[in-house]
Image (cartoon, rainbow, N blue to C red):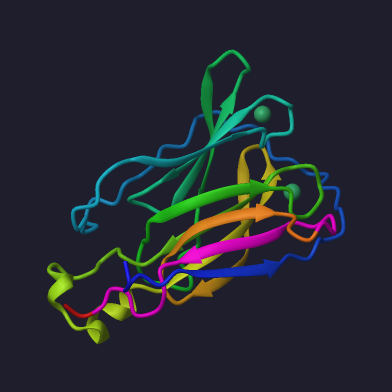
Amino acid sequence: MSRLKLMLAIVCLCVMPMTVWAEEEAAQKEAPEVQFPKERPMNGWVGGPYKVKAADVTGDEIIDLVLSHYPIDAVTVEKGDGKGQFTRLGLFQVPLDKRNLIEPIFNIDLGDIDGDGLLDLVIGIGGGAGVPQGWKALPAEVTKPYWPGRVVIARNTGNGKFQSMVEYPTESPAKGVALADLDGDGRLDLLYTARGAGYPPPA
Ligand SMILES: [Ca+2]
Ligand SMILES: [Ca+2]
C-alpha cells in the first residue's frame, strides 16, 4: 500500500447559464446494443456492466439506471417505467479523439452541473487497454504511456443521451469520481481520486 499514492483533487465547476434546449431528438425505436471490440486484448479483464447509478436522468421523475461497462468506454441509460422494468434508451461512448486506446471506465457519478434540471455525468477513466502481456515485469518507462487517465464531464442532452463537454487529464487512471457542493455556494464541485504518477512501479 505504501506504493499506492492516492491523489485527491477538487475542481470548481462553473455553472453555465440555464439554456433551454428546444430541440429534443425523437425517441429511438431500437435500443442500442453495446458492442464489445472483438480484437481488443483483454489482459485478463472481463465483464460487462460494472458501475451502476439509480436516478432520474430523463426528467420524468421516474428512476432510471446509468450503467458503465468495464471492458469498453461506454455508459448506457436504462429508462425506468416505475414498475421495475427498464429499457435501454441511450449509449454514450467517451470520445477517442485524444487517445488511441479504448479504456475502461472505473467510476461514474451524476449531478446537474449546468442547472437545466437534468442530471449530467462525470466519468473516471484510465489506461490499461493494450498494456503488454507481462507488464508487471516491464520497466515503468515502457508501461507508463498506457496509464494516464482523465475525468470526463458529459452534459445530459435529454432522451438518455450525453455529450462530452470537458476532460481533465490525470497522470494515472482516475478511479473515483464524485460531485458535491463542498463549500455551500450552490455549485457542484468535482472530486476525483487517482492511483498516482508512476503506477505501476517497476518490478
Ligand atoms: Ca426517468
Ligand atoms: Ca444538467
Q: Which residue is at the front of the view, 176 or 155?
A: 176
**In terms of secondary structure, what is the magenta stretch mainly?**
loop
Q: Residue at x 61, y 59 (%)?
A: 153
| Quarter of the picture holding the N terminus | bottom left
In this view, the residue in front, 43 or 29, is: 43
Query: What x and y, as percent, mark residue 131?
Result: 23, 69
What is the x, y in percent for residue 35? 35, 44
Determine the residue positioned at 78% across, 44% down. Answer: 23
Left or right of 116? Residue 189 is left
Point out the residue furthest to the front here.
2
In percent of the image, x 60 and y 30: which residue is there?
64
Question: Which residue is at the far top?
Answer: 83
Is 64 included in the stretch rendered in magenta? no
189 and 94: which is toward the camera = 189
Count the marks: 0
Is 124 drawn above or below residue 132 in the view shown? above
Q: Is residue 65 above or below residue 170?
A: above
- The magenta region covers 184-201
- 199 left or right, relative to 58: left
Q: Which quarter shows the C terminus?
A: bottom left
Query: Residue 41 lies in what quarter of the image?
Result: bottom left
* Quadrant of res 96: bottom left
Residue closest to the eye, 183 or 136: 183
**Which residue is at 73% across, 26% downward?**
61
12, above or below 159, in the image = below
Q: Position of residue 118 (x, y in %)?
A: 74, 42
Using the rendered view, name the quadrant where residue 33 is placed: top left
